[in-house]
Image (tube, grey):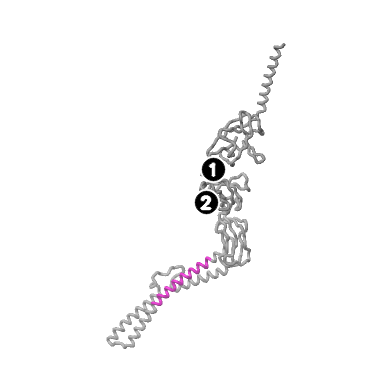
């Protein structure tokens, strides 16, 4: 009997240990396990800014006149060259007609048709040719009179009359040349006045200088506008400018032409892209930031000038860093923690994240403090993990990939 007892007792212990091991296996929590590795990463700059219209112009009246019609209102989308405001054109048309009459009169005096250029040689004009013929005749008669006076065939008075006529016709010829020059100059001036009158007539219709949308309207039909009276504000929104405040430490790390990812509160979860077009060379002494401007296509008009934007800019800076998948990080009460795997049990470890990123490996946290290369962290497949839990490993990824 004494020999049998220990045997039975030993058999009971063996069965208890087996049941305990089976129970432990049953309580093990399935989890993905990731091995922490150090990576070389190219930094991205996280910043904020606002959207601005590509162009914003205050349209003004270039001529005086009464407003006949307002053809666009706030919020309307307009095309380049589209009429927006029409002024009364009657007086302006009268001025165009008057200037056209002046041009026709000068052309008639020059002996040319409307729209024809006067001859470069003034001596070819009919009025000058007539004066030249009279001068030629008077010159010949004056020469003959001088010869006849020598032979005493005419009196001195007759010779003086021939000389006087010659001098008179010569002066008439010179006046004819001067008159042609005056008419040429008058024609240039009259044609310029005609063109100016035509421009003012066209300016009575205020048109959109570029495609865009009406931001404000300041006039109504029947108002009398003075020159430079503002009538509308037009903004161009088919492309927008994102002006971003970049911390000064990144001044040497971003460059023009880089693609920028932008997010706005109006469309959560969507990413809009732009391209850096300008970088301000000066740093603000108040904010210690400099401005980078990105151009964004907005042909569908979803984005609006004035939107607040959060931006992610690529930089040329490369650093060594440690990343863990988003699902391996727990955030409670302002503290970030991960579950560190030791054997098959886990323990909590507080970390200090340096930021969050998203790439081909998914959304990940960069860890500034709390982990080192070679550490293994666990992420629950279902449910939650707790300090001291036993985990059943469902995979070990040295290069973390969100599963």
Q: Which residues are magenta?
A: 174-199
Helix, strand or loop for disc 1: strand
* Position of residue 137 measured from the top left corner of the image (x, y, whole percent): 34, 79
Tell me the quarter of the picture where residue 89 sits.
bottom right
The answer to whether residue 133 is above or below residue 214 is below
Q: Kindly report the secondary structure that dominates the magenta region of the rendered protein.
A: helix
Q: Residue furthest front?
A: 2
Left or right of residue 44, residue 155 in this image? left
Q: In the image, is residue 139 part of the stretch drawn in magenta?
A: no
Helix, strand or loop for disc 2: strand
Q: In the image, is residue 193 part of the stretch drawn in magenta?
A: yes
Quadrant of the drawing holding the N terminus: top right
What residue does disc 1 label? 43
* Position of residue 30 measured from the top left corner of the image (x, y, whole percent): 64, 30
Left or right of residue 95, residue 220 in this image? right
In front here: 97 or 9? 9
Kindly indicate whether the residue at mark 1 contacts the one at mark 2 (C-beta within 8 angstroms): no
Q: CA distance from mark 2 to mark 1?
A: 18 Å
What residue does disc 2 label? 279
* Position of residue 372 measured from the top left corner of the image (x, y, whole percent): 57, 35
Instruction: Answer few, some or many: residues within 10 Å of disc 2's Cα (few below 14, many 20 plus, some between 14 and 19).
Output: some
């Amino acid at each position: 009997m004494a020999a049998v007892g220990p045997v039975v007792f030993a058999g009971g212990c063996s069965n208890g240990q087996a049941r305990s091991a089976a129970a432990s296996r049953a309580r093990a929590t399935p989890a993905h396990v990731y091995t922490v590795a150090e990576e070389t990463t190219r930094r991205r700059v996280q910043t904020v800014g606002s959207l601005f219209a590509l162009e914003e112009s205050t349209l003004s009246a270039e001529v005086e006149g009464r407003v006949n019609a307002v053809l666009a209102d706030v919020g309307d989308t307009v095309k380049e060259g589209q009429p927006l405001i029409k002024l009364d054109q009657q007086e302006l048309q009268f001025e165009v007609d008057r200037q056209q009459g002046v041009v026709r009169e000068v052309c008639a005096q020059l002996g040319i048709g409307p729209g024809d250029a006067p001859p470069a040689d003034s001596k070819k004009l009919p009025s000058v040719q007539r004066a030249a013929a009279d001068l030629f005749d008077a010159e010949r008669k004056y020469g003959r009179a001088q010869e006849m006076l020598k032979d005493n065939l005419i009196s001195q008075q007759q010779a003086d009359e021939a000389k006087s006529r010659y001098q008179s016709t010569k002066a008439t010829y010179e006046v004819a040349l001067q008159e042609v020059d005056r008419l040429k100059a008058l024609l240039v001036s009259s044609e310029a006045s005609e063109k100016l009158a035509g421009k003012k007539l066209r300016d009575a219709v205020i048109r959109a200088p570029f495609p865009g949308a009406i931001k404000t309207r300041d006039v109504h039909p029947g108002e009398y506008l003075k020159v430079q009276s503002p009538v509308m504000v037009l903004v161009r929104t088919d492309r927008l400018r994102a002006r971003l405040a970049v911390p000064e430490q990144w001044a040497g790390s971003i460059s023009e032409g880089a693609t920028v990812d932008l997010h706005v509160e109006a469309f959560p979860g969507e990413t809009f892209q732009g391209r850096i077009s300008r970088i301000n060379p000066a740093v603000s002494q108040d904010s210690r930031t400099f401005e980078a401007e990105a151009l964004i296509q907005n042909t569908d008009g979803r984005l609006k000038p004035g939107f607040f934007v959060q931006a992610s800019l690529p930089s040329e800076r490369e650093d060594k860093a440690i990343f863990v998948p988003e699902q391996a990080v727990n955030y409670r009460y302002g503290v970030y923690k991960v579950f560190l795997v030791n054997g098959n049990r886990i323990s909590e470890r507080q970390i200090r994240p340096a930021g969050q990123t998203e790439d081909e490996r998914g959304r990940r946290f960069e860890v500034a403090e709390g982990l080192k290369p070679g550490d293994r962290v666990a992420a629950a497949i279902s449910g939650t993990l707790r300090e001291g839990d036993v985990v059943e490993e469902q995979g070990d990824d040295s290069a973390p990939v969100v599963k």
